Image (cartoon, coloured by chain):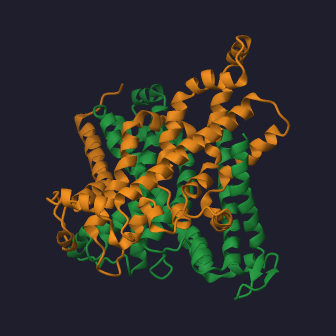
Chain colours: A orange, B green
Amino acid sequence: MIGQSPLRTFIAHAVLILGILIVGFPIYYTFVASTHTLQTILRPPLPLLPGGQLWNNYSEALFGGIGRIGGVSVGQLLLNTTIMALGVAVGKICISILSAYAIVFFRFPLRMTFFWLIFITLMLPVEVRILPTYKVMVDLGMIDTYAGLIIPLIASATATLLFRQFFMTIPGELVEAARVDGAGPWRFFIDILLPVSRTNIAALFVILFIYGWTQYLWPLLVTNSNDMNTIVIALRKMVSFADADTEWHLVMVTAMLAIVPPILVVVLMQRWFVRGLVESEK
Amino acid sequence: MAPQLAITLVFFYWPAGQALYQSMLRQDPFGLRTRFVWFANFRKVLADPAYLNSIQVTVVFSLATAIVAMVVALLLAVMAEKAVRGKGLYRTLLIWPYAVAPAIAGMLWLFLFNPSIGSLAYVLRSLGIAWDPLLNGTHAMILLVSAAAWKQISYNFLFFVAGLQAVPKTLIEAAAMDGAGETKRFWTIVFPLLAPTTFFLLVVNTVYALFDTFGIVHAVTGGGPGKATETLVYKVYNDGFVNLILGDSAAQSVILMAIVIALTAIQFRYVERKVHYG
């Protein structure tokens, strides 16, 4: 290791702390704002320290229902968003692990055709085909349902590809050994494949959970009624800069509640998250 | 296998086909008759000054976002490599924004910088800067880029850290023995070896700025003021769902698909090249 002068180390720390300040400040300030009264927020500059309204604001938002979005409580929004994020994460993992299993371990006609059919979807995110996809949803009567929120987002190829790559590294001897011991395809899947891909599943789960939680365009289109909105969309509806009646203190509470769960997931599952992110994208 | 195929076919190929088909149709103003017009919609869209403006906006926005996010992240990653103590803590504190939805990131920044109640806008004004992102297109763009780049820093940071760790220590030590200073070591050894990571991130960031930032644009500026921040994806949404010009919107969708496919192809070429390098 090359020695470093104390000055350089000091600079490194200083830059990092500055970076953390930039990264953390908007979130911290939102928290501060969520603990003040509306009157304090409307008169800038806002104090840098939290105020005393923490309990009042949060209980009002969580249990009271918010007028601008049709009296829906933030609790309901959180529930919707959680269902959507979990649904996307779990659904995508289940579907793609099964497809990858089929593609890697079975020989059947048109196998590669199917693989390419799935593979091409990698290139086209929802954003570029919103209108026709929306039409399909209307035809199937899936507007304002959880299924409508979740299912179209499940069918993408990233997770399938990741599992495929991982399965291909599983040595043929393992498959042979399982077969010699009399394990059928299903048994092999449950007893061998699932346990060895545990870390991959955890990593993917974190990434997909965040993906589902932060979706914007799709929930915006598919949910019309206020009590089916995800928290991000509801937040957008609560903010208005044109008129003065935006209840900023409640907006800030909602923003905090929308931010904190995914941050917790990322920070607590950091090890898998970092691994999954760096590996899945390469 | 079957479930994914079914979902892919219903929610993917069917809509994509519809988009292609619809992009060649034109409805009369009352929606009574629909005509097949081949590529007329494409010609119309490509000749439309609003569309060309939107392309320009998108290019400026994507490049600015990608560059800002990457430069900041690289700086932080290099510093994090140097700071031996507290590396894990710094990383934990820097990855937060990844979990924040783009739309919320946009709203937080708007809250800080909006002219009437934003505290940082207040600071700017007291410094004598006439700051108004709601009326001034350039200011609105700066605000969007900051919010979009802010959210992307943590992602780039993680990749740069991984890239830096892959640089062989022996090379750096050899250079140090030859008398290369720290700055020189960085530019002649570390930076070139990071090139694959950098290039990969450039593609990913561009795609991010093209698509995932719809939420930011929609939540913060709504494409305005005027059309100063109307990106391509926002225009597809606006023409299709708000103005109901279906043919144009579909034609734009198809153009976007072409752009994404091109970007993905570039990315894959790069992946192949990396394999050759081992």
Q: Quadrant of the C terminus of chain A?
A: top right
Query: At which x and y percent is residue A249?
Result: 25, 66
Q: Quadrant of residue B139?
A: bottom left
Q: Residue at x 38, y 78 (%)?
A: B134
Q: Quadrant of the N terminus of chain A?
A: top left
Side of A71 where B36 appears, left or right? right
Side of B212 where B181 appears, left or right? left
Please, which residue is most extreme toward the top here? A181
Q: Residue at x 81, y 81 (%)?
A: B35
Side of B175 where B208 appears, left or right? right
Please, which residue is most extreme toward the bottom here? B29
Whether residue B49 appears in this view of the structure is yes
Q: Tell me if residue A246 comes above or below residue B195 in the rendering.
A: below
Query: At which x and y percent is residue B135?
Result: 38, 81
Q: Nearer the viewer, residue A231 or B170?
A: A231
Please, which residue is most extreme toward the left here? A52
